[in-house]
Every structure is written in structure tokens, then in C-alpha cells.
Image (tube, rainbow, N blue to C red):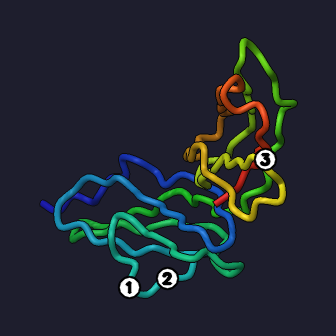
Amino acid sequence: MNVPPTITQQPQSRAAAPGAYAEFNVGASGTGLQYQWQRNQTDLPGETNHTIGINNVGQTDFGAYRVIVSNAGGSVTSDAAQLTLAVSPDLAIPTLNSGSFALTFDTEIGPIYAVEYKANLDDPLWVELVRTNGTGAPVTITADCAANSNRFYRLQLH
């Protein structure tokens, strides 16, 4: 008896910055599974795994992604997950507390956020303090102010 596949984990919407990497995946159960990813309901040639990765995201990559999972028993189509343009995060007013500098910002699912610093604005190079994946929740980054009282910080979206 051929049993059609079941989707056990739907692809999740995410945001990406231009030139970044984005990935969608689906969980499915069944035997002899085959996958076909679509963007805006159009098949994507060669995208036949449970995961699809988009390198160097460009304008034409934004849209709705879904996957058709099939086997000898039938097929099922996942929910559509949106790939959207990541927006610059809103920054809370930085705080100084007990010798620590704290920077809080909202994140979206998908992008990578990097906090960088330099001691002098004339310095051409920024030094990465921390890099974190966007989770859709606010993130707070702290730095020791006592040792680094003259730093300039920026937040980069990757």
C-alpha cells in the first residue's frame, strides 16, 4: 500500500540582506520522498532536496517559497514561506551600567548581525566585537567600558 508523504515541519519565513545567504528547509515523513521547491509557484530547476539554499540573495530571489513533497502514494505541498528584504534594525538608546556598555536591537529571522567597533573614527578598519544570528527577538550586546572607554560602535547587517 502506497502512503502519501506528510509534512512534519513547514518552511519558515525569513529575511535576508542583499548579497547574503538564505535557507529554507522542510521536514517530511514517508518512503521514497522526492522534493521540488518553487518560488512564487514556479518550479526551481535542480532544487530537489529537503533544503534549499540561496547564495548571494538578489532582488529576484525575494518571494514565496514552498516545496512539493511526493512519492508513489501521492504528494503534499508545504505552506509558503516568504523571503523578504531585511530592514535595518531599530536600536535602543545604548546604556552604561556598572562599567558596561549595552546595545539592544531587534532582529529578524534570517540575517546575521555584527557589532563592530573602532577607537578612532579616522581609523579605516572596524573590529568585530560579536556576530549573532537573527532570531526574531531583541538582542543585547555588552562590552566592558572600563577597559575600552573610547570606542565607536556600529551594527552591520549581513
Residue 46's tag is: 1
Looking at the rendering, which quadrant does residue 58 occupy? bottom right
Q: Quote the CA–CA distance across marks 2 and 3.
A: 33 Å
Task: Label 1, secondary structure: give it.
Answer: loop
* Residue neighbourhood size for the residue with mark 3, other residues' Cα within 10 Å, grouped as few (<14), some (14–19), many (≥20): some
The residue indicated by pointer 2 is 43
Front residue of 119 and 17: 119
Residue under the image location 76 percent in, 15 percent down = 97
Identify the residue shown where x is 84% and y is 32%: 92
Image quadrant in which you'd find residue 136: top right
- Secondary element at tag 3: loop
Q: List x then y, in percent, for residue 60.
A: 68, 81
Which residue reaches farthest bottom?
45
Residue indicated by mark 3 = 89
- Give how far across and how far down residue 45 sits, in percent: 43, 87
Q: Nearer the viewer, residue 122 or 3?
A: 122
Query: At x 71% / y 26%, what residue is drawn?
Result: 145
